[in-house]
Image (cartoon, rainbow, N blue to C red):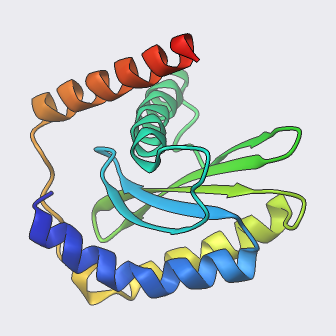
């Protein structure tokens, strides 16, 4: 996606993302496209790199989509992981032909049910954004693969070093 498109869309997504974080009581919400580009984020991002989370979310989305097709399970709805202190909610949705993925990180201040409820409201709010009514241009698939591989290599090397 071009820089001017990202800026335009990010500005439009600020309000709905801020509302989602407040009402769902999540610590962080990141909205990415299927290429792993960060469209918007709100909340505390200390302790992790937003770009790394975006790349991993896009890779997870691609893997879950492929598994669903392979097994005939249909479109995947969301992934949820409950850790000791934090929980992760990853959910795809389509807004006027644009495949988007929400990553929400939350703790004991919220619940999966609350996050799901306000995720549905976020999706409705995003559908009402005029800037998303026209399909956003996607980057070249080859370029995306190279960026994703480089990002994953960087993440894995940081993890091995740490």
Q: Residue at x 27, y 23 (%)?
A: 150
Q: Quadrant of residue 104?
A: bottom right
Point out the image quarter for the C terminus: top right
Q: Residue at x 46, y 35 (%)?
A: 56
Q: Residue at x 52, y 77 (%)?
A: 17
Q: Quadrant of residue 147?
A: top left
Point out the image quarter for the N terminus: bottom left
On screen, residue 25 above or below 137: below
Closest to the observer: 76 or 34? 34
On screen, residue 15 above or below 79: below
Is 12 on the left-hand or right-hand side of 133? right
Q: Residue 79 in the image: x percent, y percent?
A: 66, 43
Is 136 on the left-hand or right-hand side of 150? left
Single out the residue that lies furthest toward the top: 160
Q: Quadrant of residue 99?
A: bottom left
Single out the residue that lies furthest toward the front: 162
Q: Residue 106 in the image: x percent, y percent?
A: 75, 58
On screen, residue 106 above or below 60: below
Q: Residue 69, can we see it?
A: yes
Q: Residue 120 in the image: x percent, y percent?
A: 62, 73
Is 79 on the left-hand or right-hand side of 147? right
Closest to the observer: 117 or 150? 150
Q: Residue at x 77, y 48 (%)?
A: 87
On screen, residue 58 above or below 41: above
């Amino acid at each position: 996606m071009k820089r001017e498109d990202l800026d335009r869309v990010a500005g439009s997504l600020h309000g709905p993302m801020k509302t989602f974080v407040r009402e769902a009581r999540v610590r962080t919400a990141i909205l990415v496209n299927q290429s792993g580009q960060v469209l918007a984020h709100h909340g505390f991002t200390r302790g992790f790199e937003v770009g790394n989370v975006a790349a991993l979310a896009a890779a997870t989305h691609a893997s879950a989509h492929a598994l669903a097709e392979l097994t005939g399970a249909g479109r995947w709805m969301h992934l949820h992981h409950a850790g000791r202190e934090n929980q992760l909610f990853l959910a795809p949705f389509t807004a006027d032909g644009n495949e988007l993925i929400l990553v929400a990180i939350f703790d004991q201040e919220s619940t999966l049910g609350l996050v799901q409820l306000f995720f549905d409201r976020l999706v409705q709010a995003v559908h009402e954004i005029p800037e998303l009514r026209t399909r956003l241009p996607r980057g070249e698939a080859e370029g995306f693969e190279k960026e994703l591989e480089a990002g994953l290599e960087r993440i894995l090397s940081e993890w091995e070093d740490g």
